[in-house]
Image (cartoon, rainbow, N blue to C red):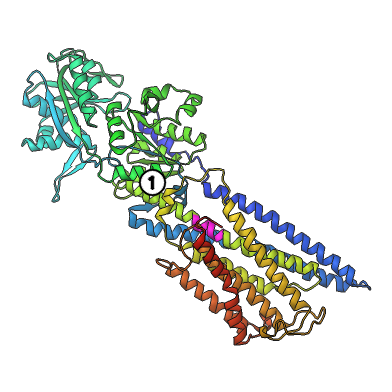
Amino acid sequence: DKTENGKVFEAAQIDDSVKTPLNEQLDRLGKLISRVSYAFASAIIAGRIAMYFINVSDFDWVAFLAFFLQTLMVAVTLIVVAVPEGLPMAVTLSLAYSMRRMLKTNNLVRKMHACETMGATTVICTDKTGTLTRNQMQVYKADFFGEPSDEILYEGIAVNSTAQLDMSGDRIQVLGNPTEGALLLWLRKRGVSYLDLKDKAVTVEELPFTTERKYMATTVRSSTGKTILYVKGAPEIIFGMCKDTAGVTADEINARLFEYQNQAMRTLGFAYQEINDGDKTIADGKVVATGLTFLGIVAISDPVRTDVPDAVKEVIEAGIKVKIVTGDTPGTAKEIGRQIGLWNDSTDSDRNIITGPEFAELSDTQLKERVRDLKIIARARPMDKKRLVEALQANNEVVAVTGDGTNDAPALKTAHVGLSMGDGTSVAKEASDITIIDNSFSSIGRAVMWGRSLYQNIQRFILFQMTVNVVACFIVLFGSFMGMQSPLTVTQMLWVNLIMDTFAAMALASLPPSASVMKDKPRPREAFIINNAMKRFIICIGGIFFLVLLAILYYFEHTDITCLTEIGSVTMGGNTGLSGYELSLFFTIFVFLQFWNMFNARAFETGRSAFHFKGCEGFSLIALSILFGQILIVSIGGEFFNVEPLRLIDWLIIIAGTSLVLWIGEIIRLFNKQPL
């Protein structure tokens, strides 16, 4: 557990159980709906009991208990209708649909919640190699001093390496560290077999690379018969360890490093020492040899992916902050930042960049304040990324993290969304929520677009469902105070609950994503899922529907009609009660008002017409199912649904009349591009 691998393993096992933004908002919505539905149910019970005692002169316990049970059943049913049971299904369907479609954009979703959480992301902490760059390391230039022999140079590179070359296929593949692989490819271009050199040398002692030491070392019995210590790592560190600098000064080395690093190149320094009996080499986890000779430096380039600058620009314009976490030097990291459009010399300063050691010296309080301005962490160590994530989360940010190595596992596990790379280690993939198959930052932008679109789909379902619930609750409540039986029976309300909850969930969950969501800023973490535009829609549309239905109820209650064509020509009766035909008319009008409103909900905040059906075949199919389902229920439901078959003229009048809901919505969308 004391080793670096042990520390990483232990940190990767910690389940911080960070709650997703969607779960937080749905919890708040659930509490609100529960309180409101219980308030309505209590009001219905109180209202109906009050009306019972007002209208009944001779109290009868048996009759009262029967009435009370019926009232209780209506109240319980209203609670069932008020609670959007389809919401979990809508969320699950939306997530599942997004998972399948996101795979086509090179996002393999491993944990379902990550689809939506990407849409809430406010910060992306990205590594450099392979994500921002091509991960095709190649030696750009080698500067060796003191005319060292080829045997020393080549053997030092070959034996002091953990990488390998896979030459079994048509294309040579680097296995292991890409930087070390670039050195092996450099040897191969010179006709040198690194495997032959490794086989001829006998390894005596090894010191693996760590980000704390910034170098690695290997002691071998060379093919020349000598024992030699080879050291490789950060040039400034290696140069400082050497007794013999091969005639080159620190200023000359720093100038060359500055030049290479300003071109976003990775640099490595090399040194060696012939070991005699009694010489110290490695002790206490570090090189203690005192006679090292500096060999030189190598500049290794890894070009930025061509699509990354535009992808980073898109993400930044979407209001998401990007932070680079890399083991490279500050100069290299800055240059990469410049090339991708993240770093600007005229506006950014030392406050926007920090090195791993400086990062470690900050207290948690200092880091919480400083982390807002940071754009780059250079020379980062394994646990720095995890601490960065925790500091951002403490500032109420929603954090996504990219990583491909085992050392990245703790940060991937801690983040709201962990993004592993397609060619990353199995440990990184296991700790992540999404695997970016093509390793490209542009795929991360696509994931954000899907997440935001998915959240809007869930909002549209809630918008539609809450409008239905508001109308149903007020109709049943006011019907109780008007002294009539519930205008919607238990079975009718359950049918409404089924088609307006379950079917609508499937319809609205399958809507395709919109690229326009990338023009928006991330929603605030504390924002409620029902925004102001939705509140206005629910109150206005729900209120209008309620008043229309209440007027119809009042009219039916005081007249006796057998066909909608008789409206306006009948004789006023006076508390005749609702006939079965009138109940069927009211039930159907209620359903079709909501049916057409589903189209308005689909077009809500899209800037498009409700008749834009491209990519919405699933919605169209479900809408037709609801239409024919309602016709079937009314036609053959009979006593079970307390309905009577309607005349054809009534169907035509209801469908045409209620469709005004859609046409008025279209007119509003035509002249007002802003949300209703």
Give the residue displayed 66% in from the left and 76% down from the top.
587
Tell me the SS state at disc 1. helix
Q: Is residue 283 left or right of residue 6?
A: left
The answer to if 291 sits in the magenta stretch is: no
Q: Quadrant of residue 121?
A: top left
Image quadrant where one finds the C terminus: bottom right
Residue toward you, 115 or 9: 115
Give the residue displayed 24% in from the left and 42% down from the top.
134
Q: Quadrant of residue 219?
A: top left
| 56 w.r.t. 38: above or below | below
Local packing at callout 1 (Cα closer than 10 Å; few below 14, some 14-19, many 20+) is some
The answer to if 457 sits in the magenta stretch is: yes
Q: Main secondary structure of the magenta part?
A: helix
On the question of residue 80 being in view, the answer is: no
Q: Residue furthest front?
A: 671
Horizontal and vertical percent position of residue 605: 50, 57
Q: Is residue 578 left or right of residue 675?
A: right
Q: Residue furthest right?
A: 58
Question: Could you tell me the amino acid type at mark 1?
Answer: Glu
Image quadrant where one finds the N terminus: top left
Find disc 1 in the rendering and name its residue: 430
Q: Write down the region rendered in magenta.
A: 456-462
Horizontal and vertical percent position of residue 368: 49, 29
Residue toward you, 414 or 599: 599
